[in-house]
Image: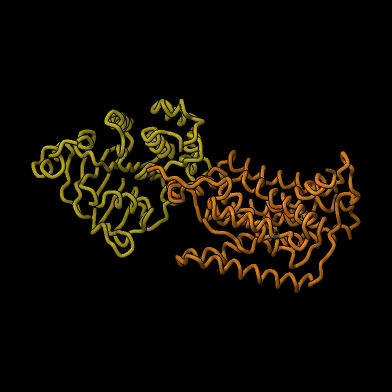
Amino acid sequence: MNILSQLIVSGIAVGMIYGVIAFSYQLTFATSKTLNFGQGEALMLGALVGLTTVNFLIGQALGTPLAYLLMLPVVFAFGLAQGAVVEWLGVRPAVKANSEAGWIMATIALGIIFRNLAENIWGRDALRFPSPLPEASLNIFGVRIQPMEIAIVVGALLIMLAVEVFNRRSIFGKAVVATANDRDAAGLMGIDTRRVITFSYALSSMTAAFAGVLIAPVTLTGATMGAVLGLKAFAVAIIGGLSSGMGVIVGGLILGITETLTGYYISTGYKDVPGLVLLLLVLSLKPSGLFGRATIKKV
Amino acid sequence: MLEVTDLVAGYGKVKVLHGLSLTVQEGQLVTLIGSNGAGKTTTLRAVSGMIVPESGSVRLDGEDLTGLPAFKITKKGLAHSPEGRRVFPTQSVLDNLLLGAFPRLTGARPRGDVEADLDRMFALFPRLAERRTQLAGTLSGGEQQMLAMARALMLNPRVLLLDEPSMGLAPRLVAEVFATIARLKEQKTTMLLVEQFAAAALEVADFGYVMENGRLAAHGPAAMLKNDPAVRAAYLGHAH
């Protein structure tokens, strides 16, 4: 029983990270029906830029927790810029040329370029990211939890909530939702939908970069850290539905927990299998995702 | 006020408009009628920037708007309530109306009193007031039509383009839509109305244009067109 709850708790932290990255896929899909297949690299770059910033700030004799907090705005700004570049270089030209799949290749290519760039700047080795919180586990009802795991869950929920509040409350957020609903009609409202799409790429990469610095203290950072995370989160986005906000949290948790359970009860070698089996099942039984709605057009 | 000259437009290689000219004067209600496929909707789309015209020009108070993207034309004060209503289904009635005022709320157009205009819309369409927090996608067709019109009016437009506001509505609602259009005309709203109900449109309009195969077939004061034998035979002959 204790082991089971321990496994579930560990699965939740990983699952929330999958959920946040999947959420970042949704952001660009909603407005543009395109995705950044280099999303894992956005996460990786965020984590590495965060690492350099944190180390610099610690070098300025700041404590790790304060350095971590001061690093966040830098990583946010970097993520926004990186996402805008991806949209501008990879997506916009392909969409303008009416190429159905051009943006897929372009975002994959940019992802590879970013990974190469990171390998040259930060090297090929995995690097340790200083943890802003104590690394000793807390014992809560017999379950050992790292403080950073709690921070991951809280941080993940906060960023999703922040985006949701922005979309619902501010007129610019409403413009984003309007663009997602009906791009032509949004244009008739005086909304520059191209700029909205650039913005959603920026916001998407910012979210991924944030996920990178959330998970970095409990894993290791390095140029290759994003590839597998990006792919699994993509599976979560498909499982949860590319258009359903809630779905990615549940999808992420399902994947995170099944992974840790499989890793313990079956074999760590098969850790990645159940999630992908789930993906195949969802694709064949409910292609719009577990929580996605089939789109109904009212004429 | 709105001046369209020799407009040629279409979709890809298919040309729909072959040189169309029309004028809407300030405070006027002008209607554009014609059979299905004559190019009425395409005209509105080319005017509001939803499609880029191949040639010809669109001017608003002398300013050339030809070929600008829709969002820029909207910022100049031209509102377009498009065919099929196109309300934002996952947003509330209130949010749809606020989005109609987007250029005012973001400084692209004079702000004026947005609150007062919301109240004006709710007075004009009491049913929207009852449903202000409801998602637009859950409204009935008639309510969505009212919302689409109110949303366009929230721009405080210099010119309002209305595309088939009566489409798909029950007869009682059609009468209501036309009553609203008549009321907007009394308030001196400048409008270009595309309608399938030619007789009803000519009844409320000041001036009318009749389209046929992407060209003008006739035009003149609405009262005159209404009694023109050729127009009557072609468009008003069948009781709707």
Residue A203: in sight, yes or no? no
> In which quadrant of the rendered view does residue A224 lie?
bottom right
Is B180 left or right of B34, judged from the image as shown? Answer: right
Residue most extreme to the left: B229
**Residue at image location 23% in from the left, 38% down from the top:** B197
Q: Nearer the viewer, residue A10 or A66?
A: A10
Residue B231 placement (x, y as % from top left): 13, 43
Residue A275 placement (x, y as % from top left): 67, 56
* Quadrant in the picture for the N terminus of chain B: top left
> In which quadrant of the rendered view does residue A235 lie?
bottom right
**Residue at image location 75% in from the left, 52% down from the top:** A14
* Quadrant in the picture for the C terminus of chain B: top left
Residue B65 placement (x, y as % from top left): 37, 54
**Colour basis:** by chain
Residue A266 placement (x, y as % from top left): 77, 57
Q: Nearer the viewer, residue B236 or A8?
A: A8
Question: Which chain does the orange colour mark?
Answer: A
Residue most extreme to the front: A266
Residue A226: in sight, yes or no? yes
Q: How many marks?
A: 0
**Residue at image location 28% in from the left, 52% down from the top:** B4
Question: Which chain does the yellow colour mark?
Answer: B
Above or below A232: residue B198: above
**Residue at image location 30% in from the left, 59% down from the top:** B10
Is A91 left or right of A205, judged from the image as shown? Answer: left
